[in-house]
Amino acid sequence: MRRFADFQGEIYRAGLSGSRPDLPMTAAGLERAAREAMAPEVYDYVAGSAGTESTAAANRGAFLRWEIVPRQLRGSGQPSLATELLGSNLPAPVLLAPIGALSAIRPEAELEVARAAAAVGVPMILSTLTNFSLEQVAAELASAHPGPGRGTGGWFQLYWPADPEIAASLVQRAQAAGYHALVVTVDTWTLAWRPRDLAHGYLPFHRGTGMANYFSDPVFRSRLKAPPEEDPGAAVALWSSLFGNSSLTWTDLARLRAETALPILVKGICHPDDARQALAAGLDGLIVSNHGGRQIDGARAALDCLSQVVAASGDLPVLFDSGIRTGSDVVKALALGARAVLLGRPYAFGLALAGRRGVEHALRCLLAELELAVGLSGHRSVAALSPEDLAHSSS
């Protein structure tokens, strides 16, 4: 059985010869260091949230309201993080969240993230908005970890455009490229009021960043008078007119279910009634998320929504996104009913500091801490976690 906590031993052994880690050991440390390394407008794009950023703060505050209650002398031994999800066996209940425009951080962004995900063995959820096509990233995932046991591969996240034929083309391409699941993000049919980005006048997509899946799509290209290579401004303008779909309803999700063999998860669920709608539409999973606080200022913390969504979801697996920073955060989300979690900003800051190595470092820190927290709280596996392992904070 793989031991993620061995990372701790590696660091201590290296310390005997005077070696010290050159990357910070915490998510907060990665962010502080990345802020110094990144262009101000790019850092603010990644770190920022909607409005006063109260939702992002609430996401973190929600974790502080729960405390882990450890149990002792249970013979728990070496805990297992192994998780079954949508028919795949994952080495840990962690996936890399979809983040668009990563090439604003580093030129080979998605390719480096794919290499890191394959090396650690966690799924990468690829954003629609990337600088490398979904086929290129799928090939990178396969070559980085070839063979029939090549690990967890990738999932594809869909921002559903207003043109239904382009949407269908993206889904068909994802299925043909070998992605294991489709994640439909439903809370971002338009971009929120984000003061940090507005202060810089900066939106990477308007500068052509993150357009590879559109610019390479045959249906999108057929809508242009000239190819994107010849007139990128017109191509970006077309994308801008098509991004998001304010008329999308649960009927569209049910129709999509009939049109693809891929498992479909819907990301952006915070209300139990929406969980019931997803169940009725025949979808395969839910992701509780408020987009890391990037869409609605003053929204409820995602963690505070989790238990109610789990209770309403029937047998559907529920994943959690928004605010994960530590292994103990993961323990709390799993104890409240999540099957797995998505890690976002910390790996983006790792990417900014050291490319693939930085992403691997962020993941290995989280997974080592998670494995230690599961064992030290008295459990043999992540599957054993339950609400009884938590208590409300008294402070």
Image: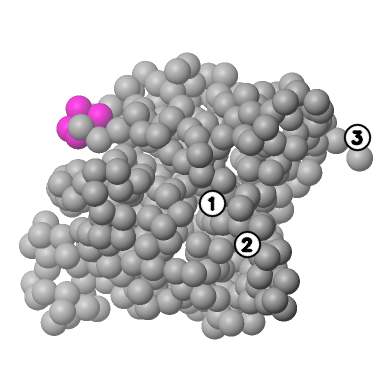
Question: Where does residue 206 sit, x and y in percent of width and height?
Answer: 36, 73
Residue highlighted by disc 3: 394
- Is there CB contact under 8 Å for labels 2 and 3? no
Instruction: Point out residue 215 in the picture as x, y percentages from the top left corner.
Output: 20, 67
Q: Residues within 10 Å of mark 1 (few under 14, many from 20)?
A: many
Instruction: Write down the quadrant of residue 257 in the picture.
Output: top left
Query: In this figure, which residue is indicated by the disc labeled 1?
Result: 343
Label 2, residues with CA under 10 Å away: few <14, some 14-19, many ≥20 = few
Q: CA distance from mark 1 to mark 2?
A: 23 Å
- Left or right of residue 224, residue 254 in this image: right
Tell me what residue is drawn at x 75 percent, y 23 percent.
74
The type of residue carrying mark 2 is Glu
Q: Label 3: few (<14), some or many (≥20) within 10 Å?
A: few
Nearer the camera: disc 3 or disc 1: 1
User: For the residue marked with disc 3, what is the amino acid?
Assistant: Ser
Sooner in the amino-acid sequence: mark 2 or mark 3: 2
Majority SS type along the magenta span: helix
Q: Which residue is mark 2?
A: 10
Residue in the foreground of this view, choosing between 80 and 283? 80
Q: Residue at x 63, y 50 (%)?
A: 5
- Is 267 in front, or is 393? 393
Q: Secondary structure at mark 3?
A: loop
